[in-house]
Amino acid sequence: MTDKDKNRRPTIYDVALEAKVSPATVSSVINKSRFVSEDKKKKVNKAISKLNYRINPIARGLRKKSLRTVGIVVPDIAEVFYSQVIAGMEEEARKRNYTLVLCCTFYNKEEEEKQTDILLNQSVDGIIFFSGSDNCEIIDKVKNNGTPIVLTDRQIEDDEISSVLIDNKLAMENIVDYLIRLGHKKIAYITMNFNNQTTVKERYMGYCESLRKHGISIDENLIMIDNEVRFDAMKRTYSIVDNFLKMGYPATAFIAIADFMALGAMKAIEDNGHEVPKDISVVGFNSDSICEYLSPPLTSVKQPKKTMGKTAMSLLIDKIEGKKIKNKKIVLPVEIIERGSVIEIS
């Protein structure tokens, strides 16, 4: 190669020239598409190493009608729950030789539409949507485009769309059942707004269902709904619970729909002169690793986050590769991890 040639990216033809074989032979070695003698393989690999040849994934993808790339549309990549699920996705994708492209929407419907259009324009092989607004229009757009889809921690009324999630209603119902068995009847509930978000709505339905089941009236004074907790969970929840306690509303237990919201609640409870769990019990949701290091350690619902990510990615890649899908809706189990933030009362 001349000095001028050294400044450009080497091509398959340069490798063939260096190895003294045909471009077709180089292609066969790279793609493992047909038999090539060991002698020629060594020559090609030596030339690849010498020239620092790198496969162009876009050009290769266009030839193969696949970029082996999956788009992930997530509301907030900084949130621990999402990052751990994505870790499971990345692990499975790497194992099956796919690359991830992450798009963050910050719970904004218009941003979700914008990021999804970008992914479709980049010709990704498939898209995974995390929980966000129940934006069925954008899901339909992707489906009509012929791009495989999987929903994670999110569900819409479309039997053709695959989803991997937990039973959010049952999970929350079990939490309230657990607290009631321990003698709690005044159970406060902290949540974000659940309009157009099935996951959050189903958890609220579980809370209400358990109270009804045990003959306990639903007290609206014990229900705190605030959409700003999405963006600053601990600080905003602290403010909400601080105001609640200063108003003098009675509660023996608090349920927060995410662990970092529960952290804010615990701090507000302590700053108002109460002790957790002696005076007020607290339960979170997700069982993030931080829970066991708190004082007291936080009782929480454990979701199989990495398993959720691996399962969703495996399901999507199976769809991309045309494999038969037996179960389009996969519901994973959860469990309550009892720690030190809840006690039985008489």
Image (cartoon, grey):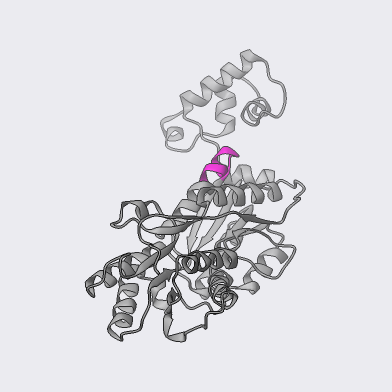
Instruction: Give the vertical position of 144 relative to 217 (above or below).
Output: above
Tell me which corner region of the image, top left, top right, bottom left or bottom right, holds residue 201: bottom right
Query: What is the total number of numbered labels drawn onto the structure image?
Result: 0
**Residue at x-position 42% and y-position 63%:** 284
Q: In which quarter of the image is the C terminus?
A: bottom left
Tell me which corner region of the image, top left, top right, bottom left or bottom right, holds residue 330: bottom right
**Residue at x-position 31% and y-position 85%:** 248
Q: In this view, does 3 lie to the left or right of 277?
A: right
Viewer-proximal residue among 199 and 339: 339
Viewer-proximal residue among 237 and 12: 237
**Residue, far front:** 346
Where is residue 323? Give x, y as percent: 75, 46
Where is residue 208? Give x, y as percent: 55, 77
Residue 165 makes an appearance in the image: yes
Instruction: Give the vertical position of 13 relative to 345 (above or below).
Output: above
Where is residue 149? Give x, y as percent: 65, 59
Decide whether the magenta segment is chiefly helix, strand or loop: helix
Residue 123 makes an appearance in the image: no
**Residue at x-position 55% and y-position 55%:** 334
Viewer-proximal residue among 272 and 313: 272
**Residue, far top:** 39
Q: In this view, does 287 lie to the left or right of 199?
A: left
Where is residue 127? Give x, y as percent: 61, 57
Magenta-tinted stretch = 90-98
